[in-house]
Image: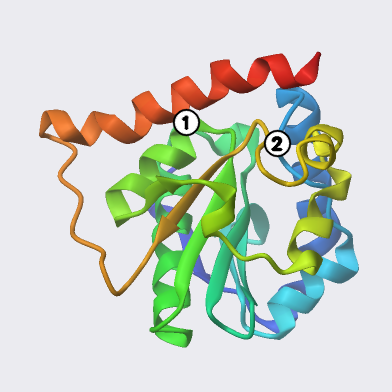
């Protein structure tokens, strides 16, 4: 396959025909990891596309990647979620392109909002860091109950409940437009988010017991 032929763009209502396939990719990825990705329905994914809050990656007429954004706390926060790439298309930089596009979409639609992500993926943490995100505690993210109910489909939801939504295996990351500075991962300080994320991961392993 030629990665030059892969288009990453904002989703439209016409892309809802891919919703079921996207949900399958999300579910299969969650099973492979054994952690992390909350299950979504085709209706939920389709609504994000129709409202202009999603990004798709296409190889011709084949859906190969997806992500979406959603506002919380009356527009004070925007979450970027559901980043997925078809296993056959991984390693081509598609996830980076999707992440950059969802970040641009969030900044364009909601320039004053804080943008956040919770993830167990070190690859996503790396992408977030390059965009200016910083690791934060869950208390610094939206406290909107509806957002956290979206985690109910995750295999680790019981941990979130038992800790009263204080921590889980995911790492919270936040981009605050009021304080954000361009990240420089070439400097030694650029490793800090990964060190913090790794520390968080091992610390929270005990939560599963």
Which image quarter is the C terminus in?
A: top right
Quadrant of residue 71 within the rendered picture: bottom right
Residue projecting furthest to the left: 187
Q: Residue at x 84, y 58 (%)?
A: 149
Colour mapping: rainbow
User: Would residue 63 be seen by someone viewing this image from the given angle?
Assistant: yes
Secondary structure type for disc 2 = loop
Q: What residue did someone put label 2 on?
A: 36
Q: What residue did someone put label 1 on?
A: 122
Report if the CB atoms under discs 1 and 2 are less than 8 Å apart.
no
Query: Which labelled disc corresponds to residue 33?
Result: none
Count numbered badges in the picture.
2
Q: Is residue 48 left or right of residue 192?
A: right
Mark 1 / mark 2, whichever is N-terminal: 2
Q: Is residue 45 left or right of residue 53?
A: right
At which x and y percent is residue 66?
Answer: 62, 57
Q: Residue at x 58, y 65 (%)?
A: 79
At which x and y percent is residue 117?
Answer: 54, 53
| Crowd tier of the residue under label 2, counting other residues whose Cα lies within 10 Å: few below 14, some 14–19, many 20 or above | many
Q: Is residue 106 left or right of residue 186?
A: right
Secondary structure type for disc 1 = helix
Q: Looking at the picture, tell me which residue is in the foreground, 34 or 200.
A: 200
Q: Looking at the picture, tell me which residue is in the foreground, 7 or 141.
A: 141
At which x and y percent is residue 68?
Answer: 62, 65
Q: Looking at the picture, tell me which residue is in the foreground, 170 or 121.
A: 170
Q: Residue at x 58, y 84 (%)?
A: 75
User: Would residue 59 be seen by someone viewing this image from the given angle?
Assistant: no
Q: Looking at the picture, tell me which residue is in the foreground, 73 or 70.
A: 73
| Crowd tier of the residue under label 1, counting other residues whose Cα lies within 10 Å: few below 14, some 14–19, many 20 or above | some
Q: Is residue 94 left or right of residue 209?
A: left
Q: Taking 33 as reference, is 186 above or below it? A: below
Alpha-carbon span between mark 1 and mark 2:
12 Å
């Amino acid at each position: 396959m030629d990665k030059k032929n892969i288009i990453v763009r904002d989703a439209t209502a016409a892309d809802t025909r891919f919703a079921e396939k996207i949900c399958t990719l999300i579910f299969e990825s969650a099973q492979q990891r054994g952690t992390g990705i909350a299950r979504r329905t085709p209706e939920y994914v389709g609504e994000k596309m129709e409202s202009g809050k999603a990004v798709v990656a296409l190889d011709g007429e084949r859906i190969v990647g997806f992500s979406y954004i959603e506002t919380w706390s009356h527009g004070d926060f925007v979450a970027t979620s559901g980043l997925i790439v078809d296993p056959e298309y991984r390693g081509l930089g598609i996830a980076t392109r999707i992440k950059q596009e969802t970040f641009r979409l969030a900044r364009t639609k909601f320039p004053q909002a804080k943008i956040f992500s919770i993830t167990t993926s070190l690859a996503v943490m790396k992408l977030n860091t390059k965009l200016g995100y910083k690791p934060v505690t869950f208390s610094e993210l939206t406290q909107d109950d509806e957002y956290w109910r979206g985690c109910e489909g995750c295999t680790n939801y019981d941990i979130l409940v038992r800790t009263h939504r204080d921590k889980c295996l995911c790492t919270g990351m936040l981009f605050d437009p009021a304080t954000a500075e361009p990240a420089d991962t070439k400097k030694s300080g650029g490793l800090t988010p990964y060190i913090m994320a790794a520390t968080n991961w091992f610390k929270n392993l005990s939560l599963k017991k």
